[in-house]
Image (spheres, grey):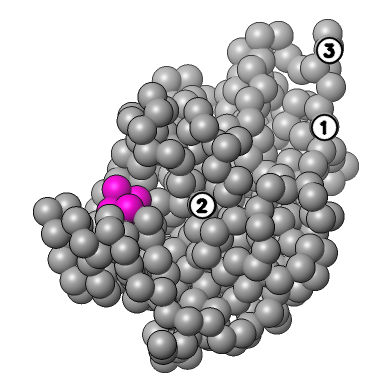
Amino acid sequence: MSEMTAVRLTGWQKPPEVTRVPVPEPGPGEVLLKVAGAGVCHSDLHVMDWPAGALPYDLPFTLGHETSGWVHTLGPGTQNTGLREGDAVLVYGPWGCGVCPACARGAENYCHRAAELRAAGGGLGLDGGMAEYMLVPSARLLVPLGDLDPRTAAPLTDAALTPYHAVKRSLHKLVPGTAAVVIGVGGLGHMAVQLLKALSPADVIAVDVASDKLDLAAGAGADHCVPAGEGDADRIRTLTGGLGATLVLDCVGADATMATAAACAAVEADITVVGLAGGTLPVTFGAVPFEAAVSIPYWGTRPELAEVVALARAGRIRPHVEVHPLGEAGEVYQRLRDGRVDGRAILVPTAEA
């Protein structure tokens, strides 16, 4: 049996290991991908940092829930799915049961049987894409990339899909003359800025503690860039004529950023938290503007991922990436933890890819 290199989580509160594992063989209904790239997501750090027993995942498993690649081998029963060997595809990240009402409409991120599955998808309890090959349990989880380069497309599956789903919920409010704020211009945040510019007429205001992240936001199309810290909410209110922002998308989710979100939001605004930093926001009289809605959406649907791909193919959005060999996973995760990743880092099986 042939072997491949993979980045595996082998213990809780431990860094991942680059090791050798057998190349999987696809069974009935399964598809084996040759991996082009796997995004390095901040949520991986949260998974690593949880103590034993906090998550239902069984160890070890291969990391990488943000994956692109080429169809390598079609398992029995997949010949009539429209896929062919060599097709460039994205792997839809959240894997549900596939048959419940939520999964039937493509919302596997909200699978009704999620608690029974003991895994959220490849790279989140099951083997993911930080390897030379990845086994996908069903062809339904693959979205064709068309003419997009799969080597740099992996972030579309999470870094773009997650803010796309969040922004789409509020598009009816983002009429001309409104403003949208993106707090935290990392992997998700720099895509959120592009999505807001592509989908709405709202002014986009980016907030971050780092000047290079604000430069990234400006390059992504932000109309205004505000340094995070004391007075940031007041400056946003000044930029919005005192009204505040109609949508505040918090891509960090810490106490400080959620406080800023509430302080700069307009009456009837949407405060949407997609960051996983574990902060809290008191929802009491006076703590948030009147009729402001606070929500915490999770990922996005399979149809929405196809919509994200369509935006990317049209040139409306483009992930800003830095590419690293698979063997440098440990160093890249440390750079991510230190806030030194520019946009989204991608791990590829070979340095040349």
Q: Nearer the viewer, mark 1 or mark 2?
A: 2
- Image: 52 above or below 5: above
Q: Which residues are magenta?
A: 138-143
Numbered disc 3: secondary structure: loop
Instruction: Locate residue 262, reporting x and y percent.
Output: 75, 26
**Residue 141 falls within the magenta-colored stretch:** yes
Tally the marks: 3
Would you call the spot at circle 2 few (<14 residues within 10 Å), some (14-19), or many (20 or more)? many
For mark 1, what is the residue? 280
Q: CA distance from mark 2 to mark 3?
A: 36 Å
Label 1, label 3: how far apart the Cα atoms are: 12 Å
Is label 1 in a helix, a strand or a loop?
Answer: loop
Residue with the mark numbered 3: 284
Taking the image as shown, residue 317 lies to the left or right of residue 87, namely right
**Percent x, y of residue 338:** 78, 69
- Closer to us: mark 2 or mark 3? 2
Categorize mark 1 by other alpha carbons within 10 Å: few (<14), some (14-19), many (20+). few
The residue that mark 2 highlights is: 121
